[in-house]
Image (cartoon, rainbow, N blue to C red):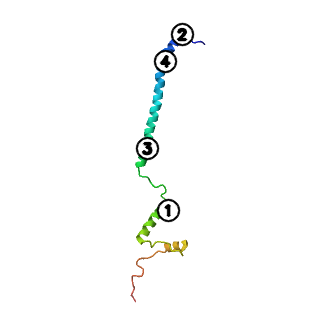
């Protein structure tokens, strides 16, 4: 199937529309890339300005903070003795002490 001269005339008149469509597509891709870059930059700036939460909020983290505070108030007396074993420390922690124990005297007969 050969191309007739009349077909060429029709194609040549449509060439400017084809060129315009292709240039719009190129500009659209560049514009889309610029918008994505601006969004990424804004997101990065927001992350820098935001307050970050601690990642590991387990029991160990809270105990460490509590232990440091207790040692600061004791003046460093809260340190472990070298001869004590971990089992002995746990046994001492399990004993409950009554604050009024030994303060009251019963003198009834």
First in residue order: circle 2 vs circle 3: 2
* Mark pair 3, 4: CA separation: 42 Å
* Of 72 and 95, the residue lying toward us: 72
Q: Quadrant of residue 101?
A: bottom left
Compared with 14, 102 (above or below) is below
What's the residue at 43%, 40% (across, down)?
Answer: 39
Q: Residue 1, position in %: x, y?
A: 60, 13
The residue carrying mark 2 is 5
The residue carrying mark 1 is 60
* Mark pair 4, 2: CA separation: 16 Å
* Mark pair 1, 4: CA separation: 72 Å
The residue carrying mark 3 is 43
Q: Residue 32, position in %: x, y?
A: 46, 33
**Could you tell me which quadrant the C terminus lies in?**
bottom left
Residues under numbered marks 1 and 3 in contact, where contact means CB atoms less than 8 Å apart: no
Q: In the image as oriented, which residue stretches furthest toward the right?
A: 1
The residue carrying mark 4 is 15
Which callout, 2 or 1, points to the residue nearer the camera? 2
Q: Quick one: SS at disc 4? A: helix
* Mark pair 2, 3: CA separation: 57 Å
First in residue order: circle 4 vs circle 2: 2
First in residue order: circle 1 vs circle 3: 3
Q: Residue 50, position in %: x, y?
A: 41, 50
């Amino acid at each position: 199937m050969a191309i007739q001269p009349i077909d060429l005339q029709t194609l040549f008149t449509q060439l400017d529309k084809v060129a315009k469509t292709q240039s719009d597509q190129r500009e659209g891709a560049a514009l889309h890339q610029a918008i994505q870059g601006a969004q990424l930059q804004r997101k990065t700036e927001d992350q820098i300005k935001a307050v970050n939460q601690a990642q590991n909020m387990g029991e160990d983290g809270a105990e460490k903070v509590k232990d440091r505070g207790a040692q600061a108030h004791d003046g460093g007396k809260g340190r472990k003795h070298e001869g004590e074993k971990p089992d002995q420390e746990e046994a001492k922690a399990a004993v409950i002490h009554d604050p009024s124990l030994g303060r009251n005297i019963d003198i009834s007969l």
